[in-house]
Image (spheres, rainbow, N blue to C red):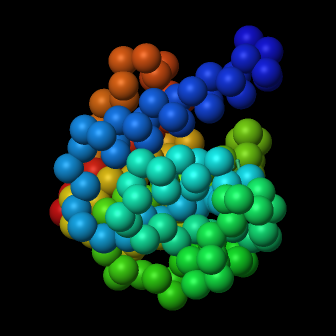
Amino acid sequence: MSRLDSFIRRLVAQREILDMICRDMQLPDGVVIELGLGNGRTYDHLRERLPDRRIIAFDRVLGAHKASTPDRENLILGEIDVTARNFFGIGAGLVHADIGSGYDDRDAVTLAWLPEVTLQLLAPAGIAASGVRMDHPDLQPLPLPESVAEGRYFIYRKVG
Ligand SMILES: C[S@@+](CC[C@H](N)C(=O)[O-])C[C@H]1O[C@@H](n2cnc3c(N)ncnc32)[C@H](O)[C@@H]1O
């Protein structure tokens, strides 16, 4: 599969998954955390689908389109494994992590801290969606929408 095909499938999967979570799943009360603001596309989508929730977006640098740039109090710049610590215990209903790089060695470094950081941000029974697999006993994998190929994206509920 070409990288273009793979990219398109990833974006379609993201939309399917975020739509399913916002439409069909019981999200606990609480903020939404967007890890990896990037261009701001998924941030903008979540903002449309969950208009009543505060969304706090993280990235190491601001690269978002002006129309998808959060206001200052909801934009946290710096390395997420450091900046997210100030938000531990915030009780997020949803954490969306789109910080996979496409390089296995770099993603392995991210995976050393991402599951624990995600758990510290989530409310009990909160939902996480991630572009990289997170193996942790307190993150229960949930089924993907039928249209999304296994392994393309991952959904979890915080348990324990
Ligand atoms: C694939 S892009 C996110 C795209 C975004 N979801 C969108 O729809 O436009 C990944 C982003 O995560 C950021 N990122 C990756 N690892 C990070 C880290 N450890 N700390 C902070 N930002 C990180 C990168 O700077 C990049 O902007």
Looking at the picture, how far across and down is residue 60, in whole percent?
75, 70
Q: Is residue 110 positioned above or below 6 on the image?
A: below
67, 86: nearer the viewer: 67
Residue 40 left/right relative to 12? right
Please count the marks in the image: 0
Looking at the picture, how far across and down is residue 112, in whole percent?
57, 61
Looking at the picture, how far across and down is residue 149, in whole percent?
48, 19
User: The N terminus lies in which quarter of the figure?
Assistant: top right
Residue in view at x 62 percent, y 32 percent: 11
Q: Is any part of residue 160 visible from this angle? A: yes
- Can you tell which quarter of the image residue 118 is in? bottom left
103, 55: nearer the viewer: 55
Residue in view at x 73 percent, y 17 percent: 5
Residue 157 left/right relative to 56? left
140, 42: nearer the viewer: 42
21, 121: nearer the viewer: 21
Indicate which quadrant contains ligand 1: bottom right
- Can you tell which quarter of the image residue 143 is in? top left
- Can you tell which quarter of the image residue 81 is in? bottom right
Give the residue at the far bottom of this rendering.
86
Residue 91 left/right relative to 111? left
User: The C terminus lies in which quarter of the figure?
Assistant: bottom left
Residue in view at x 22 percent, y 62 percent: 28
Looking at the picture, how far across and down is residue 38, in whole percent?
72, 56
Q: Is residue 37 positioned above or below 85 on the image?
A: above
Q: Is any part of residue 108 visible from this angle? A: no
Residue in view at x 44 percent, y 41 percent: 18
Q: Is residue 160 positioned above or below 152 on the image?
A: below
